[in-house]
Image (spheres, rainbow, N blue to C red):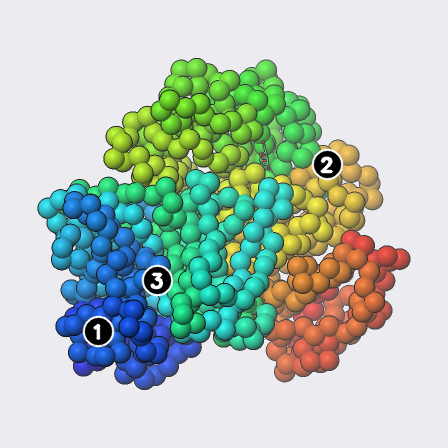
């Protein structure tokens, strides 16, 4: 049994082949944390609760017969506010008396096979009977608030999925003021925080810095994930590198206001909380009601950041992305946005499709501008009916013409938004989010619809259903181009307004669930002004997410490398566009480290460029499995090296290797041999281009010979792609 309970020591152990997580029911039924790391066989880990002596300023419980126990320094499993632990709390509940003292103690537990779904929330799942779950009930006897702590481990992965359900079993209403999904109390601050930050057009810049005493935090309060920070954090041992050392990776399956708070206490021990951002969060719970937190995914790696990333990648493809397209070959698409922006009609799109077909491209995606009175970004969001002035003869006719060429058809939506200049707004001004007595801020000329409301969601669902059900639409790009301000709902009573942000996210999930359930055959690609909502919550619904509006391949290196820390390569929406000075070859090399597609006017390609594109299309098919299902290795990172960026895919059987180098600037050392990680030293790899054969050991330890490559005069923006195959 991977999850065990040792009755004698009252210790829960959750074991996978390379990972152990342990916690203990201590005296007076305190739930204490013991361990999270490499697999260990021992059963009695109880001494791991001791992390030094507490001072006279730390409170203690006189009923506990242990002079070394204080909730103030002991690692706690789900720490609460105001009852002896002065560090940051995962749970804080304001009770009917008006105070927020919260204290939960173990009551019971159960262990069972499988994994429960989380109501209303995306979450990891167990498709093939490989998961086991531990549920622990802990009760605050004063308020009657019960915390049900959920832990699931998966047979093949060093992964733990955690969430919390809070139930009001008392007689009076309470307010949840903090309800994090998980806490992790680690024993050393000899660690670096690794995360990524950004903004529109410049997402996912990876940063790594040492932990400091005090509280450090990564958050969003934008109502959506946002490009500024991502709900991902890794703590890496200071000595850990890309391919060696211990790393704890954390990711929240959530698309709204999140927080990853790390407090390093006076003992030098970090506590990490991950969950819904407590700012602007107050959840009212009547007796009998319950609240489910989003899920936190924790990955342990002792093969560095690279090992952590590969675990996230494969785990998400197996246990998070629910779309039937996750492991089904996806069509190679061309998107109209950068090719035409709002300036298109049916004939132009048919011309695109004709050209695309000739190049081997399989799908045309009609981006923004096909609906209502939409000829620029000032109006019509919310009016999801076809603009027949543009698409003469209607959408069905256009799709028939495109399909007749042998090309599939996809479409763009921005379902959560409304322009003040729209029929929908004129009919329902109160559907746009705004706080009573205040104007709403405008961003990109638009407002956000109040997705907490069933009537709003029903309207948008029906509008979308009417179009999608009547047309042969095989792909949807779901966009979201602004964040939430003046947050309040016209229909929520005052005591529930503090729930607005989370209810918004639940509303989006509900609508996305309804659309993907009604049309399971549709390939959904999320987008939010590029990669502004790149998170596991969205990945649950859409196996690919547009990574950035920035399609320049050199800029994309940082963006895609950052996202690859936890998101699978086949989830990174990446296109070859005309919007770059880099060669077509380099643009494709970088887009190939993602979903791969095109976003340019195919009519403008020269004959020479058309031949290059045909070759790229052939490569897309040739390397599809290797890129989608292989192991990804970051070798030289663009945030650490301003000159070079190197990466590689290795097939699971280690027989195929696809290596890419992009030269951003011309360094002195670019001809040095480069060691390739992750190969089989016993195998012999043939360079497909030259026919030369190298042992895996030579490529791994001596390095790949780069001395003969022509990187051009300056080397700027050039690239090489090498494919090796072993017999
Ligand atoms: C966002 C997206 C783009 C495009 C435009 C359309 O910016 O990121 O890809 O769809 O909206 O308005």
Front position in the image: 279 or 109: 279
Mark 1 surroundings: few (<14), some (14-19) or many (≥20) residues within 10 A: some
- For the residue pair 453 and 67, the one nearer the viewer reads as 67
| SS category of the residue bearing label 2 | helix
Q: Residue at x 66, y 67 (%)?
A: 635
Quadrant of the image containing the N terminus? bottom left
Q: Circle 3 — which element? A: loop
- In the rendered structure, find residue 26 and report the number of the disc placed on it: 1
Q: Which percent across, then down, holds residue 588?
A: 70, 50
Count of all numbered marks drawn on residues in the image: 3
Q: Position of residue 225 (x, y in %)?
A: 47, 45
Q: Which quadrant: the C terminus? A: bottom right
Q: Using the image as rendered, state which of residue 380 and residue 372 is in the foreground.
A: 380
CA–CA distance in space, label 1 to label 2: 67 Å
| Marking on residue 87 | 3
Instruction: First in sequence, mark 1 or 2: give its number.
Output: 1
Please report the residue visible at 46 percent of the width from the left and 16 percent of the height from the top.
423
Q: Is residue 326 visible?
A: no
Q: Quadrant of residue 11?
A: bottom left
**Alpha-carbon span between mark 1 and mark 3:** 19 Å
Q: Is residue 588 above or below residue 139?
A: above
Q: Nearer the viewer, mark 3 or mark 2?
A: 3
At mark 1, the secondary structure is: loop
Give the mark, 1 or 3, whose residue is nearer the N terminus: 1
Q: Is mark 1 within 8 Å of ligand 1?
A: no
Q: Which residue is mark 2?
A: 602
Between 605 and 665, the residue placed more toward the observer is 665
- Of tags 1 and 2, the one toward the viewer is 1
- Whether disc 3's CB lies below 8 Å from ligand 1 is answered no
Q: Earlier in the sequence, mark 3 or mark 2?
A: 3
């Amino acid at each position: 049994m991977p999850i065990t309970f040792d009755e004698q020591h009252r210790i829960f152990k959750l074991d996978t082949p390379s990972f152990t997580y342990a916690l203990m029911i201590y005296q007076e039924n305190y739930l204490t944390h013991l361990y999270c790391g490499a697999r260990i066989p021992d059963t009695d880990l109880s001494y791991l609760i001791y992390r030094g002596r507490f001072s006279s300023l730390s409170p203690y419980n006189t009923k506990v017969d242990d002079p070394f126990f204080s909730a103030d320094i002991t690692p706690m499993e789900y720490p609460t506010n105001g009852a002896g632990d002065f560090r940051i709390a995962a749970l804080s509940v304001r009770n009917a008396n008006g105070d927020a003292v919260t204290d939960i103690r173990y009551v019971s537990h159960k262990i069972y096979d499988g994994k429960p779904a989380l109501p209303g929330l995306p979450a990891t799942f167990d498709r093939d009977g490989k998961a086991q779950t531990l549920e622990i009930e802990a009760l605050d006897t004063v308020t009657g608030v019960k915390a049900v702590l959920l832990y699931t481990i998966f047979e093949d992965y060093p992964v733990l999925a955690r969430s919390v359900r809070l139930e009001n079993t008392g007689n009076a209403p309470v307010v949840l003021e903090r309800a994090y999904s998980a806490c992790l109390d680690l024993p050393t601050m000899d660690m670096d925080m690794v995360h990524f930050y950004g903004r529109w057009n410049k997402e996912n810049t990876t940063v790594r810095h040492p932990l400091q005493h005090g509280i450090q935090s990564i958050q969003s309060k934008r109502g959506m994930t946002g490009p500024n920070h991502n709900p991902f954090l890794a703590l890496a041992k200071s000595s850990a590198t890309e391919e060696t050392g211990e790393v704890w990776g954390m990711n929240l399956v959530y698309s709204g206001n999140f927080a990853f708070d790390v407090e390093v206490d006076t003992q030098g021990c970090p506590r990490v909380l991950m969950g819904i951002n407590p700012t602007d969060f107050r959840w009212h719970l009547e007796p009998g009601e319950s609240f489910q937190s989003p899920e936190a995914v924790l990955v342990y790696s002792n093969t560095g950041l690279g090992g952590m990333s590969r675990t996230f990648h494969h785990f998400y493809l197996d246990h998070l992305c629910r779309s039937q397209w996750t492991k089904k070959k996806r069509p190679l698409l061309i998107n109209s946005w950068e090719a035409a922006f709002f300036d298109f009609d049916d004939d132009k799109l048919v011309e695109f499709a004709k050209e695309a077909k000739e190049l081997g491209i399989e799908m045309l995606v009609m981006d923004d501008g096909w609906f209502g009175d939409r000829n620029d970004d000032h109006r019509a969001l919310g009016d999801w009916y076809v603009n027949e002035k543009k698409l003469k003869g209607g959408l069905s006719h256009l799709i028939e013409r495109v399909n007749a060429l042998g090309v599939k058809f996809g479409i763009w939506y921005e379902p959560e938004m409304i322009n003040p200049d729209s029929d929908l707004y004129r009919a329902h001004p109160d559907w746009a989010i705004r706080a009573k007595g205040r104007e709403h801020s405008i961003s990109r000329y638009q407002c956000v619809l109040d997705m907490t409301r069933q009537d709003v969601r029903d309207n948008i669902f029906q509008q979308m259903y009417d179009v999608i059900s009547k047309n042969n639409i095989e792909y949807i790009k779901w966009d979201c181009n602004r964040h939430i301000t003046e947050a309040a709902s016209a229909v929520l009573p005052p005591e529930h307004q503090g729930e607005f942000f989370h209810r918004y996210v639940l509303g989006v999930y509900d609508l996305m669930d309804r659309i993907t359930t009604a049309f399971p055959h549709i390939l959904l690609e999320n987008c939010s002004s590029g990669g502004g909502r790149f998170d596991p919550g969205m990945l649950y619904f859409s196996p690919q997410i547009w990574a950035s509006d920035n399609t320049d391949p050199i800029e994309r290196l940082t963006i895609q490398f950052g996202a690859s820390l936890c998101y699978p390569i086949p989830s990174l929406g990446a296109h070859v566009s005309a919007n770059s000075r880099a060669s077509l070859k380099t643009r494709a090399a970088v887009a190939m480290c993602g979903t791969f597609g095109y976003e340019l006017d195919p009519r403008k390609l020269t004959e020479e460029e058309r031949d290059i594109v045909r070759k790229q299309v052939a490569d897309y098919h040739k390397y599809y499995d290797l890129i989608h299902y292989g192991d990804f290795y970051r070798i030289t990172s663009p945030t650490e090296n301003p000159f070079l960026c190197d990466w590689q895919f290795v097939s699971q059987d280690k027989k195929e290797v696809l290596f890419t180098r992009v030269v951003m600037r011309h360094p002195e050392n670019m001809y040095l041999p480069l060691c390739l990680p992750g190969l089989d030293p016993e195998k012999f790899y043939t360079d497909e281009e030259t026919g030369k054969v190298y042992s895996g050991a030579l490529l791994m330890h001596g390095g790949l010979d780069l001395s003969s490559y022509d990187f051009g005069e300056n080397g700027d923006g050039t690239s090489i792609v090498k494919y090796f195959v072993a017999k």
